Image (cartoon, rainbow, N blue to C red):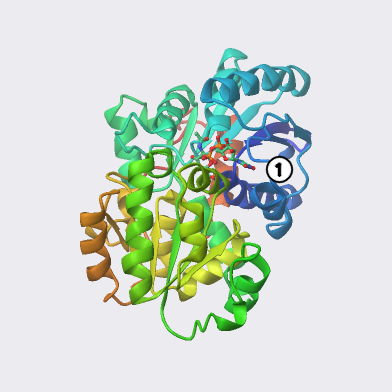
Amino acid sequence: MNSAEKMKIVSIVGARPNFMKIAPFIRAIEEYNQNGQVKIEHVLVHTGQHYDDNMSKAFFEALNIPEADINLGIGSGTHAEQVGQTMIAFEKVVWQEKPDWIVVVGDVNATCACSITAKKENVRLAHIEAGLRSRDMTMPEEVNRLVTDRLSDLLFTPDRLSGENLLDEGISGEKIKFVGNIMIDTLEAQRKKAAELTIEDILRTNCMEGHIDVRSIGLSSDFALLTLHRPSNVDDPAVLTDIVHFLTNELTKDMKLIWTVHPRTEKQLKAFGLWHKVLSADGLILLNPLGYHELLRLNMAAKIVLTDSGGLQEECCVLGTPCLTFRWNTERPITLREHGGASVLVGNDVGHIRIGYSQMRQENRAPSRPELWDGKTAARIVQALVSDQFPKKPSTGEIPQRRQSCNG
Ligand code: UD1
């Protein structure tokens, strides 16, 4: 390798859960460039799938992500509209930028769309958070994960179970790099700042307009924290109505509930005539979508988390917060009790949710840290990309190895 060697990476974000995965990656590139032998040029593309300030801009600011170099402005739409329009717009970016690598994260529509475009343009593709499988093909994210992993040249896995999934699907072990969970890089970098926030300030600043008098909250006692946004939970009126009744008639009689409401969920609560019920329920505090530090702070203090978010399941695992996952399956089994994590699956049937809640609300915080969830995942990824692009020349007698696997 000589000092003239360069490598250009285009990376993509589209929706909220992508931002905490890209922040450490960008920082690791900056750090690599200070002393590394290769000069990495990085171009950040935002597809614009999430566009509200509190779903996007707030995360760029809080996590010090530089403004995207290119914004495709895709916005909301059906899956075909989002994927199709992203592919058309991203193709032009690939022609213009001519990258050595396209790096995608997670499993949202932007991830899938840009992966397909990358391979159709013969650009090498790397997937951060590869190998997760729920085996539930009704989940749009499962389709996105399968397509992306099938097309990727390098697959960065967060845990060993994900690596096994990929091997079972016939993906060559040489392409699979077990690097750990990049989300935890962000958690470790930000938890001190989050701990400095006060819960009362978070509630006061983010409370949905006209909802509560913050002075009357009295959060000295235990509280539960809820997030909900999956189509399987919020798009079916019968399912969402049952969940809301459980929350307002049962859970809030036991402890206060803080609900940070996703825009999709707010839309559906209004469409199904449930909005007034949640607005007027005693013991239920409705918040706008929160910033990264605010949600982390609430998670650090909550007695229990109720969620259908994969990222929150992972954060609960490291923070040790008992977590009821409102899904029948998970692509992140490492976060479940049986693998040492903090989460149990309760689906969206109120009978299961009730039993799970009454058991988990008794539990104490019990942090666990899966292998390589150590805050150093992004640095391993950058090093692996460089090594793959510029393989070490074999010295005499050494067996040539074009691409070495990080798998132990
Ligand atoms: C997307 C991801 C999901 C991820 C979630 C986190 C896919 C298939 N799904 O789901 O994996 O967990 O993001 O939030 O990519 N909306 C706004 N403002 C916004 C964004 C969305 O009002 O900034 C509303 C719109 O009404 C939109 C709806 O939310 O139609 C759903 O947004 P969309 O991006 O399609 O999917 P999410 O449910 O957010």
Q: Quadrant of residue 342?
A: bottom left
Measured along the vertical axis of the image, is residue 327 above or below residue 219? above
Residue 352 in view:
yes
Q: Quadrant of residue 134?
A: top left
Q: Position of residue 3 (x, y in %)?
A: 77, 38
Q: Position of residue 98 (x, y in %)?
A: 73, 21
Image quarter (top left, top right, bottom left or bottom right) of the N terminus: top right
Instruction: Using residue 124 as the reference point, say whether residue 3 is left or right of it.
Output: right
**Which residue is at a point 54% across and 25% down the rendered structure image?**
78
Q: Nearer the viewer, residue 311 or 385?
A: 311
Q: Position of residue 225 (x, y in %)?
A: 45, 66
Measured along the vertical axis of the image, is residue 407 above or below residue 126? below
Q: Amino acid at mark 1?
A: Gln
Q: Nearer the viewer, residue 179 or 354?
A: 354
Measured along the vertical axis of the image, is residue 77 above or below residue 106? above
Q: Quadrant of residue 243?
A: bottom left
Q: Nearer the viewer, residue 174 or 357?
A: 357
Instruction: Using residue 230 as the reference point, say whether residue 336 is left or right of it.
Output: left
**Which residue is at a point 72% across and 39% down the rendered structure image?**
40
Q: Position of residue 15 (x, y in %)?
A: 60, 41
Where ligand 1 lies, by quadrant?
top right
**Which residue is at a point 51% across and 34% down the rendered structure image?**
127
**Which residue is at a point 55% across and 31% down the rendered structure image?**
111
Q: Which residue is mark 1?
A: 37
Q: Can you tell me whether the CB of the residue at mark 1 lies under 8 Å from the nearest atom of ligand 1?
A: no
Residue 198 in view:
no
Residue density around tag 1, few if under 14, some if 14–19, many if 20 or more, within 10 Å: some
